Amino acid sequence: MSNIRHALSVKRSDDFAKWYQEVISAADMAEESGVRGCMVIKPWGYGIWERIQRLLDERIKETGHDNCYFPIFIPLSNFEREAEHVDGFAKEMAVVTHHRLIADGKGKLVPDPQAKLEEPLVVRPTSETIIGDAMARWIQSWRDLPLLTNQWANVVRWEMRTRMFLRTSEFLWQEGHTAHADQAEAKEHTLRMLEVYRACAEEDLAMPVIAGEKPENERFPGAVETWSIEAMMQDGKALQAGTSHYLGTNFSEAANIRFQDKDGAQQLCHTTSWGVSTRMIGGVIMTHGDDDGLRVPPTIAPYQVVILPMLRDKPEDEALLSYCEDIKTALKTETAFGEKLRVMLDKKPGKAAAKRWDYVRKGAPVIIEVGGRDMDNGVVSLLRRDALWAENGKPDFHSPGKDAVAQSIPDLLAEIQNALFEQARARRDANIRTDITEMNQLSEHFDSKHVHPGWVEVQWCKPTGDELEKVVEQLKELKLTVRNVPIGAAPVDSACIFTGKPAVERIYVAKAY
RNA sequence: CGGGACGUGGCGCAGUCUGGUAGCGCACUACACUGGGGGUGUAGGGGCCGUAGGUUCGAAUCCUAUCGUCCCGACCA
């Protein structure tokens, strides 16, 4: 349908990276801040984050966690305690060294040498160490376990290369931290939270994911096991959308998190940590966006229904507005997904037709336009953002009756939510190859001019150490990475694609963000 | 952090090579027309050309530094 005049100037198929940036600015989600790698999240983008936050927070609380808040500054000595952890994060830290500025006599302010901190503070890149410190104080006995905490916070990682929402120097997230009496319980909890993330991604964000364990080389610094949910973006690349780590006793040893067991003996706790960030929003864009902008799943849309009166700056406007208010009032009494509908009546002066495209770009799930003729006929003009265009290349308006429209919206929103998920799942499934068993097939698949090579499921022998390094190098030449070892995969039935040894598990291999 | 490109009204760009104090499209404001679709016309408002130094009678334009952005690479829960 090439005669359609799309709402964006760049198409996904022409330049995916540029398209991604255009969606963010056209949907008015975020903008550059002037500070390297940091962004201003605008109301529509932040509204989506608030929705994700709220829905995920409920799920986290349902699994027994309480929220708390720890300082953004971590004493350097505290951070230094876990060697691998330090190794992983040291090169991307923001460090506070002074607590006062002083005029330099040339009209500038400089850090006052007199005000140098005795011990530098690092801006948290994650909070295992400072929370571990607290856990050591909070936990005395087996009766204090399990300790289940979570915090919503910002963190800073001095990234070399940043992209809005996907990798920013400062980002918002949720980090859960738990302590358990033994390994089995801690591991079980790691998987329980991974499942919470899967449900949140698939049910709340309508973003299909594959849950599995990360290979050794992709582990979180200091973790014994790292698990992830991986989503396929529309360009076929993988996005790690959430991680859950079993930390063993590494952080307990570093921070001395111990408890007295029933027999009176001192034991180290087994801890976990898990996080999901504003990166999820990047995932939503690249999962549901189209050539007209964003499409927000109704569960996380700041407004699920936007009403646009076709104002003419004439006396008749008053009746039209009152007609629209009726619709809004009726909608407000409805519920969808167990919550009240979120409805906006845009009364701002301006052409409805022009405003319509603003909301199309923002991806409001349902747009209701109302003009004088609708009013006369007792109907409204309704657009589904997920199915915008009719066969004739024009916006596909529906005309439900005014009195019936409110009641129909909850079902419609559920249908849209489902349609978005199914579209994404079908696309993902169509872009996973499972028939590749040889390295040359793999290079051919990813070398060829395939615009959309997607993911490949292969079998491997789960190498470790140097042997794994070799595999990672081979993959790197093709710009590929091992995404994860999916939970619940079929049993292996062939040789390792990299070494020829008997395979022990299946893995997903893909280009990644 | 290496290589490349770039930074000019809100957005997208021209002007930079060949110095002479800024222009286009969209958006914006006002009025009029139009009126079921992102409309038309007329008239306007808004920029010390990222920032700081330097060269020059004179700098968006030349030189230096610096900050930021994008692409490629290295790195990366």
Image (spheres, coloured by chain):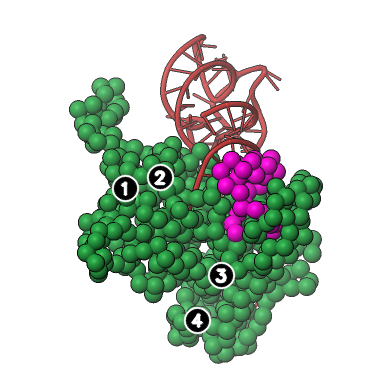
Counting residues from the start of the chain, the first of labels 3 and 4 encountered is: 3
Q: Secondary structure at mark 4?
A: strand
Q: Which residue is mark 2?
A: A85
Residue A416 place in picture, x, y as percent: 61, 76
- Disc 3 is attached to a residue of which chain? A
| Nearer the observer, A132 or A101 | A132
Q: Which residue is mark 1?
A: A254
The residue segment tinted magenta is A456-485
A464 part of magenta stretch: yes
| Nearer the observer, A115 or A177 | A177
Looking at the image, which residue is at 57% across and 47% down?
A464
Q: Are marks 1 and 2 in contact (CB under 8 Å)?
A: yes
Identified by mark 3, the residue type is: Glu
Counting residues from the start of the chain, the first of labels 2 and 3 encountered is: 2
Q: Secondary structure at mark 2?
A: helix
Q: Are marks 2 and 3 in contact (CB under 8 Å)?
A: no
Q: Secondary structure at mark 1?
A: helix
In the figure, the green chain has which letter? A
A469 part of magenta stretch: yes
- Disc 1 is attached to a residue of which chain? A
**Can the viewer see residue A41?**
no
Q: Looking at the image, is mark 1 or mark 2 nearer the viewer?
A: 1
Residue A134 place in picture, x, y as percent: 25, 55
Mark 1 and mark 3: Cα distance apart in space: 36 Å
Q: Looking at the image, is mark 2 or mark 3 nearer the viewer?
A: 2
- Disc 2 is attached to a residue of which chain? A
Looking at the image, which residue is at 42% across and 66% down?
A184
